[in-house]
Amino acid sequence: MLAQIKNTASFIRSKIDFEPEVGIILGTGLGRMVESMEIQASIDYRDIPDFPVSTVEGHAGKLIFGTLSGRRVVAMQGRFHYYEGYTPQQVVFPVRVMKYLGIKVLFVSNSSGGVNPTFRPGDLMVITDHINLIPNPLVGPNEAELGPRFPDMSEPYDRRLVTWAGEVACKEGIPLQYGCYTGVTGPTFETRKEYRFYHTIGGDAVGMSTTPEVIAARHMGLPVFAVSVITNMGLDGAKASHEEVQSEGAKAEIKMTRLFIGMLEKLENFI
């Protein structure tokens, strides 16, 4: 795996003379953030050796390089999921490649179902902790160059970045929620009892991504900041659809873009 990671990173560097500082993963319906970037180059996933290919509607499947708020950024316009048939190691492969391209911090976004009854569709939830119910990407032989065999996960989401998010949101007039994200395999949306179960065990939102990528990032020592866009409310018994997720994600994307831009402006003394 380590050789593949290095080979893929070398291929990308051969195509573009650009060392990113920040990696950004854009979730379902959230890919238009790249329109705010000064784009220098983009590469289709299908053209990158050993890279998975996005199969889900709402995921463009491109690696975008450019500047955003004065920071050198590489953005994944679309991610990969365990439910697509990829192994957990394949799901997190791009995060590892971005680390070898030079990123010092990872920003993550996703669309999720709210299980906290105080939430509403369109809310932005800063993730402060997670419950991972997706097979762990670190299962198998450990590559010591990537990180330790038993990485600490007491702070999966960097507390300084969470604090800065509150400061940016206050300045920009963006309401924020805070909570725990539960990562599940999908691809089915949850039953009513499952939604209640995830809330009972401590979750505030539930989705089908993010936790494997965060585990891989923390394994490599990358600080992480993550936001969930609440696209539907699981506890109200209403039917959920992928179209609804995309629609609500698009509506909230402007707020999330402003938040991410403000966060990038505060990274001067962080990276």
Image (spheres, rainbow, N blue to C red):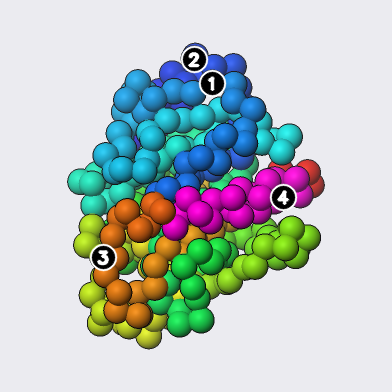
In the picture of the structure, the residue carrying the numbered disc 2 is: 15
**What residue is shown with label 1?**
41
Q: Which residue corresponds to the image point at 39% horizontal and 25% vertical from the top-left?
A: 44
* Bounds of the magenta segment: 248-266
The numbered mark, 1 or 4, whose residue comes first in the sequence reads 1
Residue 152 appears in the rendering: no
Q: Dominant secondary structure of the magenta stretch?
A: helix
Packing grade of label 1 (10 A; few <14, some 14-19, many >=20) is some
The earlier-in-sequence mark between 2 and 1 is 2
Residue 81, how many percent across, how many down? 31, 49
Asked whether disc 2 touches disc 1, contact meaning CB atoms under 8 Å apart, the reply is: yes
Query: Disc 2 versus disc 3: distance between alpha carbons?
Result: 39 Å
Identify residue type, mark 3. Phe
Tags 1 and 3 touching, CB below 8 Å: no
| Residue 159, above or below 220 | below
Q: Which mark is residue 262?
A: 4
Label 2 sits on a secondary structure element that is: helix
Quarter occupied by residue 136: bottom left
Specify few, some or many for label 3: CA neighbours under 10 Å numbering under 14, 14-19, or 20 or more.
some
Distance from disc 4 to disc 3, alpha carbons, whole Å, reads 33 Å
If you read the primary sequence from the N terminus, does the residue marked by circle 4 or circle 3 appear first?
3
Q: Earlier in the sequence, mark 2 or mark 4?
A: 2
